[in-house]
Image (cartoon, helix red, strand yellow):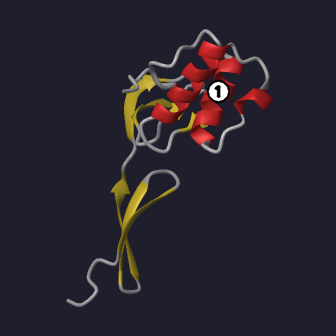
């Protein structure tokens, strides 16, 4: 039983898989879908592992985006050049404020609270 579980991963579309030696085993789809139709008639994702803030992907809990948004809000930032920062999430949060100054920083795009 040498090298039984070498890798557990996820590919686009939410398929979980493991690699055992030279064999790839699909474990199943990990996206959960609700039963209500979305705007285009398709199913709406009820739960996802990915979060977004202002259309930008969050690497974890969106706190960096929220911090950048709040910083820009306090300073009344109006130009993208003012958002220059080494942290991508902070910069993206700042840009989100410029794009949508009334959205707030307390929730991600799905309405989940940001700690």
**The C terminus, quarter of image:** top left
Residue at numbered disc 1: 94
On screen, 25 above or below 112?
Answer: below
Q: Residue at x 61, y 9 (%)?
A: 102
Relative side of 59 to 55, left or right: left
Relative side of 2 to 35, left or right: left
Q: Residue at x 51, y 35 (%)?
A: 64
- Residue with the most extreme left position: 1
Residue neighbourhood size for the residue with mark 1, other residues' Cα within 10 Å, grouped as few (<14), some (14–19), many (≥20):
many
**The N terminus, quarter of image:** bottom left
On screen, 56 above or below 4?
Answer: above
Q: Is residue 63 visible?
A: yes
Expressed as whole percent of the image width and height from the top left, the position of residue 69 reads 58, 23
Q: Residue at x 52, y 28 (%)?
A: 67
Expressed as whole percent of the image width and height from the top left, the position of residue 10 reads 43, 59
Expressed as whole percent of the image width and height from the top left, the position of residue 109 reads 52, 25
Total marks shown come to 1
Helix, strand or loop status at disc 1:
helix
């Amino acid at each position: 039983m040498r090298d039984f579980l070498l890798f557990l991963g996820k590919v686009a579309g939410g398929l979980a898989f493991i690699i055992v030696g030279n064999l790839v085993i699909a474990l199943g789809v990990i996206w959960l879908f609700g039963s209500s139709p979305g705007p285009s008639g398709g199913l709406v994702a009820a739960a996802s592992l990915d979060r977004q803030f202002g259309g930008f992907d969050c690497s974890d809990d969106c706190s960096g985006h929220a911090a950048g948004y709040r910083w820009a809000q306090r300073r009344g930032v109006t130009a993208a050049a003012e958002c220059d920062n080494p942290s991508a999430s902070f910069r993206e949060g700042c840009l989100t404020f410029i794009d949508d100054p009334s959205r707030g920083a307390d929730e991600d795009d799905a309405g989940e609270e940001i700690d």
